[in-house]
Amino acid sequence: MRLLTEAAWVAGSAVVAGLGVALVDVGKTGQVTWAVAVVFLAFGCCLAGLVAAVRRWAPGASSFLLWPTALLVALGLVLIYRINPMEAPIQVWWIVAGVVAAIGILLTLRWGVERLMPVGYWLAAGGLGLIVLPFVPRLLGGESESPHGLWLTVGWGNVNFMVQPFGLGAVLLAVGLAGIHSRWALESVSNRGAGRLVANRDLLVVGAVWVTTLPLLWATGDLTAWAVLVVLSATIAYAATGDSRAVWTGLSLLGIGFVIGLTSSRMRETLQVWLDPFSAGDAGAGLKESLLALGSGHLSGSGLGMGEPELVPRATSDWILAALGEELGLAGTVAVIVLYGLVTAAGVGVSIGSRDLFSKVAAAALSFLLCLMFLSAAGGLQRLLPPTDLGLPFLAYGGIPLLAGWLAMALLVRISHEEQGPL
Amino acid sequence: MTDFVFTALRLIFLALIYLFVWYVAKGIANYLGLGTSLRTTRLGSRLVFIRSESQSGMHFTVADSVVLGKSPDADVPIDDPYASEFHLRISRRQGKLSASDLGSDNGTYLNGRRLRTPVDLARGDALQVGRTVLEVR
């Protein structure tokens, strides 16, 4: 029975991807191409492989964690195929890589997710390293700005492509901080009377993340992405310790960072674009076109292949929700918002049901991170928040956001399995 | 292709997405235990799977006595890796349903409390076996 149910979900997700590609083909050329079959089979096989791995290494996990993710990935692939068909095959390969990475996580952690707790320092350091990688070398070289924001150009010979390591870094940072704070919370009984430094070390970690990521604000002016990191670190410290000073420390550091950031020309430019994108010239082109695209979507959108989302700069990555809003309208946008809400709700459910502190904090941190990244990217393109380069996990082109999303999901699946383990 | 057909396909695509979202939302609500209705004092006669990977919505009526468990030989097989082969018995005595654990490894929980002795059931009670939840209706 369970096999039939899972087969139905896999087939349903693949049908959404295939039907979406067919609609794009019909909308653009009036004919259906082989891409429909390729996308249907490739997507279906990837999901079937992932479901088989979950049944093998995390049979007690709720498969409902996978399906909202699968639908978001399917919608992202359809939109990328719509906007730039050349990028769609690369995205398919990134989906394969993400699924393989997720299976690798399930396989590696089959003896227990708590194995990550002792390596929390390394994970957090690695995550911070990935986050600052695009711009710190430039700052050390004497340049004050990062021309491509959060993006990093990687190249071998004549082949160059851009990646955004922020999402992957943030996932590693979230798990690493969960490990650090949980370990200290478990040790806290033996540390009573050990001095103020030990008593306040959770707050010091929030400060350390703030100091390390401040160059991001300076070099890129991406206030929203930087705020995600500070809020995340303060929230994880609060979740692990229950100490409300973590929240107040995070909020204070946000304010101080904002004032320091105002001395950066990039941040002043970001704020100017946010306040008045229509008179900000080329810098405001993304936000301006995004607002126009969303405004032309109406209730059910112009139809896949019938709008003009290619007018939005970097429409497949940073502004993909604007393209979705234009072609699928309010109905499509609300569906995506609900799907991210369901991913977060399922993650919070896993956290509540977890029995050990590390699993509880790590599940809460990962679901909160996915929620924050969605709110930041969606708020940025609707001008509710300062615009950001953050890619939407699962939906955006670029590989790393997709990889980061699958890794976070694999960890949640593993924690969900352990939640249901023998009592 | 006519505009009418294209528009119909477009709306079918959106409807398919919402159908998918609806079933996912229902599954997650069951997973979070939000589907449990308020307890009433009336007697119940049937049990409904309200949280299960593959049996959500299925129900059965207890005429005399049924044994639930992972084994295919159980009267009501439960698709749950954390259920025992023969996990619990539900029987009817003088119109009242009662549940008794059959020495399962992971225990049976009635409204969040582990069953130690046979207990009478009322409509709205939630029985948890592994990760599966059944409600008396």
Image (cartoon, coloured by chain):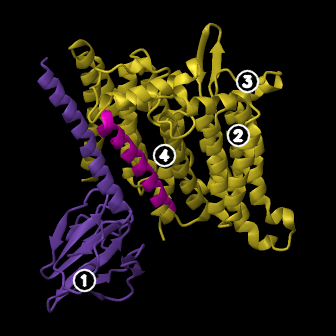
Chain colours: A yellow, B purple
Q: On screen, B40 above or below A52?
A: below
* Mark 2 secondary-structure assignment: helix
- Amino acid type of the residue that numbered disc 3 sits on in the rendered structure: Glu
Q: What is the tally of numbered marks visible in this picture?
A: 4
Disc 4 + disc 2, Cβ < 8 Å: no
Residue A119 in the figure: left or right of residue B117:
right
Q: Name the residue carrying label 3.
A: A145
Label 2 marks a residue whose chain is A
Front position in the image: A391 or A309: A309
In the depicted structure, whether residue A49 falls above or below residue A135:
below
Direction from residue A228 to residue A122 in the image, left or right: right
Q: Position of residue B32 (x, y in %)?
A: 39, 63
Q: Chain of mark 1?
A: B
Q: Amino acid at mark 4?
A: Met
Q: Quadrant of residue A385?
A: top right
- Mark 2 burial class by Cα count in 10 Å: few <14, some 14-19, many 20+: many
Residue behind mark 2: A128
Q: Give the number of the mark in front: 1 or 4.
A: 1
Q: Earlier in the sequence, mark 3 or mark 4?
A: 3
Q: Which mark is residue B40?
A: 1
Query: Same chain for marks 3 and 4?
Result: yes
Identify the residue under disc 4: A409
Where residue A167 sits: x, y (%)?
A: 58, 37
